[in-house]
Image (cartoon, rainbow, N blue to C red):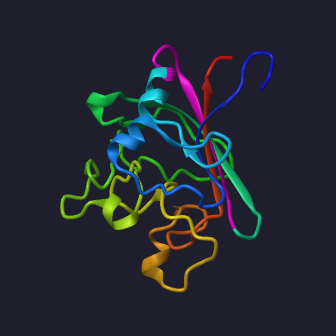
Amino acid sequence: MTAEGGWTVVQRRKDGSVDFDQLWESYENGFGKLNGEFWLGLLKVHQIMEQEQYIMHIELQDWEQNIQHMEVNFHLGGPSTAYALQLTGSVAGGLKNALCEFRVQPFSTRDRDEDLKSDVNCAKLLSGGWWFSTCGQSNLNGKYFNYIPRHRHERKQGIFWKTWRGRYYPLKSSTIKIRPLKL
């Protein structure tokens, strides 16, 4: 926090204490505990952002204690767009973009398939709800592993960011937070 304001945490993963393989209603309304692992809720985030432009900060940590982040201006649509995510500026920070490889991407869960793959439900295949597009770039709501699984088919269900540690490296922690573009 600063005198002008601070960040609103939207998502936190750090220990696997909350199962993120949730249905649409849970992702829309939020789940978990604010002092631990949680997802704030797509509807709440959309309502927060209705009046002004926002910036998103994503911070990731691997199992070697390396940390990377990115910041980007973005827009989150409402319920009628399936909370479509659109990046509206260039990415800053050491973490390369692995979100929205297409211009606007709706959110998907295993009970509401909004991804761009017509032959598979990415949320069922990978676990958790996310802006999946074609399944392969990122999923910060995947299964939490306290170790790196031996089998590749398990690893692909974990928390991953392809442009940093690769598609089959389950990350240790992630945080997504937002703040108004103009403080």
* Closer to us: 74 or 10: 10
Q: Could you say which quadrant of the image residue 38 lies in?
A: top right
The boundaries of the magenta stretch are 48-62
Relative to residue 32, is residue 132 drawn left or right?
left
Looking at the picture, how far across and down is residue 37, in whole percent? 61, 49
Residue at the image point whose x is 80% and y is 16% from the top: 3
**Is residue 1 at least partly visible in the picture?**
yes
Residue at the image point whose x is 51% and y is 73% from the top: 168
Q: Could you say which quadrant of the image residue 145 lies in?
A: bottom right
Query: Dividing the image into 4 quarters, which one contains the N terminus?
Result: top right
Q: Is residue 80 above or below residue 113?
A: above
Q: Is residue 46 above or below residue 158?
A: above
Q: Looking at this rendering, what residue extends furthest in the bottom direction?
A: 150
Looking at the picture, how far across and down is residue 73, in whole percent? 55, 31
Residue at the image point whose x is 40% and y is 62% from the top: 127
Query: Dividing the image into 4 quarters, which one contains the C terminus?
Result: top right
* Closer to us: 58 or 110: 110
Indicate yes or no whether the magenta region holds residue 115.
no
- Give the number of marks: 0
